[in-house]
Image: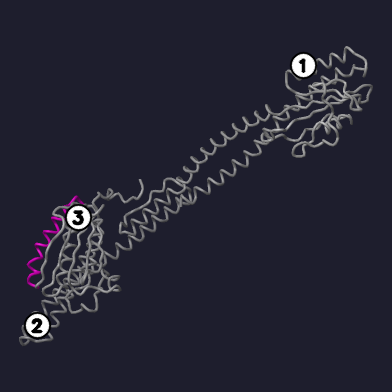
Amino acid sequence: MRSRLLPLLLILLAGVLLALGFPLAASQAQAEQQRVVVDRIDDTARFASLAQFVTSTTLPDERRATLQHELDRYRDLYGIRAGVFYRDGRTMAASPRDWRVPPESETAGEGGRPDGARAYAEALAGRRSHDPPQVWPWQREGRIAVASPVIRDGDVAAVVLTDSPTGPMRSRILRGWLAIAVGEAAAMLLAVGAALRLTGWVLKPVRTLDRATHEIATGKFTSRVVASVGPPELRRLAHSFNEMAGNVEGALEQQRAFVADASHQLRNPLSALLLRMELLALELPEGNEEMASVRAEGKRLARVLDDLLDLASAEHSDASHVVLTDVAEIAAERVASWRASAERRGVTLTSAGQAAATGWADPVALSSALDAVVDNAVKFSPDGGTVTVTVRAEGDHVTVETRDSGPGLTDEELERVGDRFWRSGRHQNVSGSGLGLSITRALLAGSGAGLSFAHNSPAGLRVLITVPREAPEATGQGLAER
């Protein structure tokens, strides 16, 4: 979710920064040009005050010479062309001296920008030049023309015109834009950091909920969420999740308690009933078939009650007894214990794989699980069959694989194997309650291990018990987040 939320926030933040940056850059360029235009207007006003006293148009005049000298100095100092022109276009004074008013046919320069002729025409009308079109840094030939009228006796007698290069101004605009770009980049970095913190703050309760949900789905029903950070809505969701998890755990606990209590309470009357049946059998002829059938059903019922009590106990177990265990040693012990029983059935039971492989498990639960798996493998293997128990360390797990040469299971049966009270229709004549593998799975889940099934080649079933090699998280705290 973070990978989807973070780009959205970054795009929005980048859009806001760009929306602010472009107008700021344009405003900075306009302010820089406005400063240049104001300077040129002041310069033209000064030249206009000098030109007011130049009266002769043909004869040498000291004031005219002074004006020409000022224009030459101005051009030498700033590199700006400047001139004073009469209404009819004749030159009063200009620098360079061959500079003339641009003809009307050249009223637009590069890109359609009005130039000196437009400014000259506005000054003849008695107005100072309006703001010229904006010159941008990429307009290398851009120039700024500013004109002011020379007023004498209330009439426009001449026009002062300046034509300025824009290289220095464009350089200053670029430097200003560079500063804006640096500021935008710094703001974007801050925005990225803020977005990372914001998404982390918003999604932390979601990650905690996801982790707690996974733990509950894998059987850790005591897992809870501590929602101390995040938006109020997600904190309320975490509180509701804890209430739901508590209710589910309570319901399951009641179910387990009911199964355990029922199994325990039924054992006493069932034992009394079996005893009465044995007493009654003493009064019947030897070999009575009905009594033998009743005895078998009674023993089967007793075995089912014992299995139900074991299942309830297994589901109630936790990982508090998980320790670093030599899985290979326990597997070898269980194989040795079952070898005599397998030989009586005509089945060869062998062990293979690594002689030592440590993992984190409950030794009692692991031994009980191996007993159930090996018992099933021997039980369903034919006379002369082989059962092999192999231990190997793979990655972050130790695997105990039990292979038998029995009839195996179909794909549909593989999906149901391990369900409570389920038995294949082909194996109904084999003794059992259908709870052995369910008890095994519950025992392993309580200690953090796993149980899975697969086809064996060429025939039979593969049962895999996986034990983690890394230490589990601290147990008994019941919290998914600290």
Sequence-wise first label, 3 or 1: 1
Label 3 packing within 10 angstroms: few (<14), some (14-19), many (20+): many
Amino acid on which the number 1 mark rests in the picture: Arg
Q: Which label lies toward us, 1 or 2?
A: 1
Q: Is residue 209 within the magenta segment?
A: no
121 lies above or below 69: below
**Which element type, helix, strand or loop, lies under badge 1?**
helix
Checking the image for residue 280, the label placed there is: 2
Residue drawn at (73%, 22%) of the image: 79
Residue sticking out furthest to the front: 98
Which residues are the magenta region?
322-345
Alpha-carbon span between mark 2 and mark 3: 45 Å
Checking the image for residue 73, the label placed there is: 1
218 lies above or below 42: below
The one of 359 and 257 positioned closer to us in this rendering: 359
Alpha-carbon span between mark 1 and mark 2: 140 Å
Quarter holding residue 111: top right
Label 1 packing within 10 angstroms: few (<14), some (14-19), many (20+): few
Number of callouts in the render? 3
Amino acid on which the number 3 mark rests in the picture: Asp
**Which element type, helix, strand or loop, lies under badge 3?**
loop
**Residue at mark 3:** 362
Residue drawn at (9%, 87%) of the image: 288
The one of 386 and 241 positioned closer to us in this rendering: 386
